[in-house]
Image (cartoon, rainbow, N blue to C red):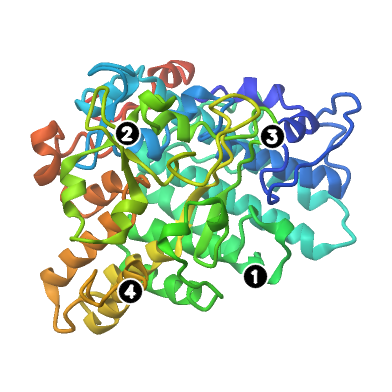
Amino acid sequence: MIRYRMIKNGLKFCSVALIFAMTSCSKDYLEVEPSGEPTIENFYKTPVDAEQALTAAYAPMREMYARENFGAANANDLVFGDVGTDDLLKGGARVNDGPHLYEKEIYSLTTSNSAVEKLWQVNYKGVLYANLVLANVPGIEFEDEERKAGIIAEAYFLRAYYYFDLANTFGGVSLIDSPLEPGEYNVARASVTETYAFIEEDLKKAIATLPSRFDKGADYLGHADKGAALGLMMRVALYQNKMDVVKTYGEQLFEQSYVLADYTTIFEPSGEWNSGSVFEVNFSSNADKLGTLIPRMIGARTKGGVGFSQIKEDLRNEFEANDPRFEASFYNVPGGYGTEWYIKKYSIAPFSENPKPSVGGTGNSGNNIRIIRLSDAYLMYAEAVYDTDPTTAISYVNMVRQRARGENDASVVPDLDGNLSGQALLEAIYHERRVELAGEGFRYHDLIRTDRAEALLGPLGFKKGLHEIMPIPLSQIDLSQGVLVQNPGY
């Protein structure tokens, strides 16, 4: 299956921790003098080793958006995920620029698509690194047993995070819960139900132990905390239509100290880890290769970007008149191929206050990637209870709309009618998700999980029963000697 042998034998944890800095601690990065190249056999001896192993387990999460892996930074939901939907045009320099994205746009994915390959490789790398933490850290002696338990809980969160991305992309996948030995590398796929059950169990373990970031210092920002695990559990349940589970974990999340933040600042530097941020991936442009490639990939081509993931008219028309979120989400630059409308949320100057990188080139931006936001959780919760408690659902949607309205007159993004119910209320929730989360990589998944993809994306080439998931990379099937079975239709 995955190139597991190559990854496992090539691990040098201290160098990994140094290369990727400390993804899991605000924007202050570790400065450690390397000494030799520790092996698995003489590593995992001290709490410092455990922290460095955990840092390595976070690295694939940031690699999916980072400068050091160009292919992976083209494979995440921000660039790859919503291409081919009614929200995003592929963009770029010409109609067939970026073959991996072009295949996605015309619904003709091949088993050698480079983005699909990276989704598989990087996520399984994350699974391996998390498994190494879970297998080895319990045997390390700690004076601070609470921190030891926290490291293990973070590893459970990370493994769930990586498997969730795999399940959304491929359906049921090979479930590996410990480091494998030679001869064990080829593992058959589990069912999608089994895969989700595995993810849920990991998240339950994480939720039970993780602290809240509100009880920790600023140096904890970037670590998965209880809120992050609760928010991810809500999303995992939502994608399975387990609305009772969404409700249960949403109520626990809302007990945390989150507050909706000013929409116009959320994606600015001042909005990083704001009061409504549930989880982010940290980036910095203060050193080479510590930044994210996303602003360059989706930036206007005539302004130094690559021009991918341009905003379609259908999405622009979804916004109500004078909705302040429109200006906070998009910007227009005439000229070049495509719609000429771009995602502002991950832009750099002059389109936002995020500075142009001064170190490492134009693909080394310091924008944090927002993974889970409170407004998303509010809307997930509203969707979960709309049919059983419409009044509560309306109240959560209205909290999102009121925050969007800001200081404007009540006629701007007005509150929902308190009498809405049934399908009309559900459609209002769908609308709110689309405009609130525009350009954040949720549209494709939302249309699939709500069974609206065929109706809305069919004219663009989507085929029900085929395009809900992507092909297993042929290279991985070959490596598995046929143990991995391809998804139907590919």
Query: Which of the two discs, 4 and 1, labels the residue nearer the N terminus?
Result: 1
Mark toward the viewer: 4 or 1: 4
Q: Is residue 477 above or below residue 192?
A: above
Residue 240 visible to an observer of this rendering: no
Q: Which residue is mark 3?
A: 20
Query: Which of the two discs, 4 and 2, labels the residue nearer the N terminus?
Result: 2
User: In screen coordinates, is 475 left or right of 258?
Assistant: left
Q: Few, some or many C-alpha atoms within 10 Å of disc 4 (few <14, some 14-19, many ≥20)?
A: some
Q: Which residue is mark 1?
A: 214
Q: CA distance from mark 4 to mark 1?
A: 25 Å
Q: How far across and how far down the image is residue 189, in percent?
A: 41, 35
Q: How far across and how far down the image is residue 298, in percent?
A: 39, 33
Mark toward the viewer: 4 or 3: 4
**Mark on residue 402?**
4
Residue 334 visible to an observer of this rendering: yes
Q: Few, some or many C-alpha atoms within 10 Å of disc 1 (few <14, some 14-19, many ≥20)?
A: some
Query: Which of the two discs, 2 and 3, labels the residue nearer the N terminus?
Result: 3
Residue 301 occupies which quadrant of the picture? top left
Q: How far across and how far down the image is residue 436, in percent?
A: 32, 58
**Mark on residue 309?**
2
